Image: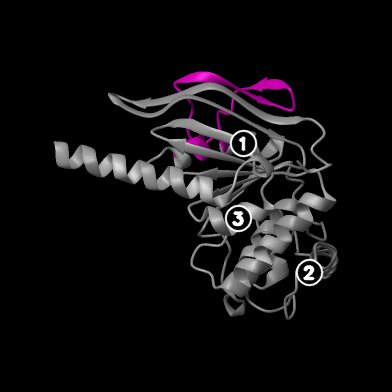
Amino acid sequence: MSSKANGELLRIEHVAKRYGQVVALRDVNLQVNRGEVLGLLGDNGAGKSTLVKIIMGYIQPSAGQIFFEGQPVDLKSVALARALGIEAVYQDLALINELNVYRNMFLQSEVTKGGPLGILNDKQMREASLRHLENMGVNIPSVDVPVVKLSGGQRQAIAVARSVYQDAKLLLLDEPTAAMGAKESAQILDLIQRLKDESEVGIIIIAHNYAQIFDVCDRINLIRGGRIVFDKPTAETSVQELTDMVVNEYRTARQAVHAG
């Protein structure tokens, strides 16, 4: 575990989510510490998306309790989750392609010069964005270019940097290296490693490709059938162990199909 992981940040106890007769989550227990990177792995339909939506306040659990920084919280909305310092970066990134980098960095939190007209203070936003991106080690051609001209990895880095700039305490990254080449994926993983080494931001990486994210994670959770079935520090497991578990799951599923 990272030396920065010096206290509980998020704790989920016995959380369940039902939609009528359909059970999406059942008795989920999960913990993330400050400065810790948790890999949340699972197949499609395993419950990852439902759990993330609960943490972000999009939906409310049917049962269970959530604690943030040691206090019980009722995450009734996204606004409340964000006010606590919980931010998410999804695959669509929520960036505006036509806007330049520094305008995207301050999207929905624009700095104005004051007065009745509320004129945007582009100079201040530009300088702050440049300074923040340099401090995080994010390399882009210029903060003045529209984000549509950046690579997928650069856009992902901008979205992550924006969340950190907005004082995120817990950052949820949904498939951060999906559809990226090796070089772009390496850039994103390097950025996550720097955040882990240099800050107390807790990070949950939601991913299918566990081999790709394994090295930056402190701990791995595997969710299956709406339940966390595996929770180990990465130092005590391996990509091979995870692969064997997934292969066995598929074999069991296939046998059940043929038996039916």
Q: Is residue 116 visible?
A: no
Measured in 3D between alpha carbons, the distance from the residue under mark 2 to the one under mark 3, in whole angstroms, is: 36 Å
| Horizontal and vertical percent position of residue 76 | 55, 28
Q: Disc 3 designates what residue?
A: 213
Measured in 3D between alpha carbons, the distance from the residue under mark 2 to the one under mark 1, in whole angstroms, is: 46 Å
Residue 72's place in the image compared with 43, above or below, is above
Q: Which residues are magenta?
A: 50-77
Residue at 24% across / 44% down in the picture?
Answer: 254
Measured in 3D between alpha carbons, the distance from the residue under mark 1 to the one under mark 3, in whole angstroms, is: 15 Å
Residue at 56% across / 59% down in the picture?
Answer: 93
Of tags 2 and 3, which is closer to the observer? 3
Q: Disc 2 designates what residue?
A: 122
Instruction: Answer whether labels 1 and 3 touch (C-beta < 8 Å).
Output: no
N-term-proximal mark, 2 vs 3: 2
Residue type highlighted by circle 1: Lys
Looking at the image, residue 186 sits to the left or right of residue 251; the answer is right
Residue type highlighted by circle 3: Ile
Secondary structure state at the residue bearing disc 1: strand
Q: Disc 1 designates what residue?
A: 232
Q: Residues within 10 Å of mark 1 (few under 14, many from 20)?
A: some
